[in-house]
Amino acid sequence: MSFDEIIDRFGTHSVKWDMMEKIYGVPAEDGIAMWVADMDFRPPQCVSDAIGKMQSQGVYGYYGDETAYREAICWWMKERHGWDVEADAIFTTHGLVNGTALCVDAYTKPGDGVVLTTPVYHAFARVIKAAGRDVVECPLALNDGRYEMDFAAWDAQMKGHETMFILCSPHNPGGRVWTREELQGVADFCKRHDLILVSDEIHHDLVYPGHTHIPMTNVDASILDRLVMMTATTKTFNIAGSHSGNVIVPDEALRAKFAGRMAALGISANSFGLYMAEAAYTPAGAEWVDGLITYLDGNRKILDAAIADIPGVGSMALEATYLSWVNFADTGMPREDFTRRVEQDARICVNHGTTFGKGGDTFLRFNIATPRARVEEAAARLRAAFSDLQ
């Protein structure tokens, strides 16, 4: 397929495009939607073919016999990430926000503290608060434009009521691919404070050349009795509307707890998501992802070049994800000013950094997973909107 194809998503119930004017005031007639984390690309043909096969059969009943589906997950994780997954350890949830909520429900109780390394994906805090748990923000250190973990500072923050740590790996919104040493630091931190570790690795397939994602399971075998892994096809293959994700639990005791909460809440898988996942986790899907990464790498460079032309603005070096994290701190502008320039002058709809927690105030998040012509247009508009600084 061509990632350059412009697909009109207006009128398709697309949150990203149909809601940008209502929510942000960015005009629909010529606005560029760079906020919601889905892509403006069709999924690989193998995924579309799987849905076509369902349609031609014509009966949309319950999905049975998950053997091939689970085998596809195990194959992908081994082939792409060197991770041996036990088929019985896989639970299918309604996406990973649902997976996060289920982990909070299964492994913590009201009033417990759940550690987040902020700024971080905003849905984590939302579900933690909604469940009556305490969000414990451990800010990432920003050193030379790059996020780093500050375990000494985090150790000093702990009050003793914390029972869970949610890791975003690779990191959203900063795009960091954590090193083995950093991940070992997380493992050690969780052991020191007796925390369940939930590792959300939804962006693990979207890693740029020169960087390698390491699954948390492959870091330290001594933490497998406190580790829960989360992965999904949805971000990788642009099928987020299927609302399917996998919570993978290596430890049998933790697995039993999770299974109990799934049963108590009556949660079962969406058959469309399972059909698409089985089709995606194949050599054909892998070839598509490789092409996607090359294309996104080109988009990344175009936006970075535009940002580099604006004094006082800097984009964090993107190691993974298709979400560019742009810092306006050195412009000296108040948040309302630089946000207005981006949204009203440049007519680009973006995520506000404040929603990601402590440390996000001076940032905006741009989604570059859109045809290159749109990225080039966004780059030109940004240069124009901040032309007085150049």
Image (cartoon, helix red, strand yellow):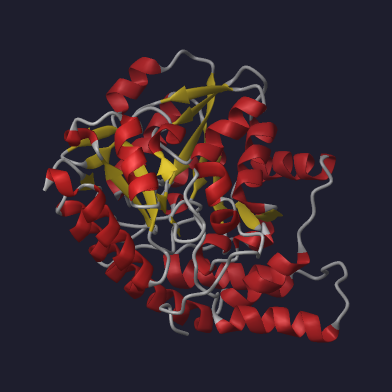
Q: Vertical placement of 315 versus 164: above or below?
A: below
Picture quadrant where residue 11 is located: bottom right
Of 376 and 296, the residue lying toward us:
376
Picture quadrant where residue 293 is located: bottom left
Of 114 and 390, the residue lying toward us:
390
Q: Vertical placement of 152 versus 18: above or below?
A: above
Q: Vertical placement of 56 versus 285: above or below?
A: below
**Can see residue 126?**
yes
| Count of labels in the image | 0
Question: For the point 35% across and 62% down, which residue is it?
Answer: 207
Of 68 and 383, the residue lying toward us:
383
Question: For the point 35% across and 39% down, which residue is it?
Answer: 339
Question: For the point 86% across and 67% down, which residue is it?
Answer: 62
**Residue 373 horizontal/vertical position (percent):** 35, 72
Task: State left or right for residue 28 relative to residue 204.
Answer: right
**Residue 301 horizontal/vertical position (percent):** 23, 64
Task: State left or right for residue 319 relative to residue 188.
Answer: left
Question: For the point 50% across and 43% down, which residue is it?
Answer: 24
**Residue 306 horizontal/vertical position (percent):** 21, 57
Task: State left or right for residue 116 relative to residue 123.
Answer: left
Task: State left or right for residue 10 relative to residue 293.
Answer: right
**Can see residue 362?**
no
Picture quadrant where residue 269 is located: bottom right
Outermost residue to the top: 159
**Residue 172 horizontal/vertical position (percent):** 41, 47
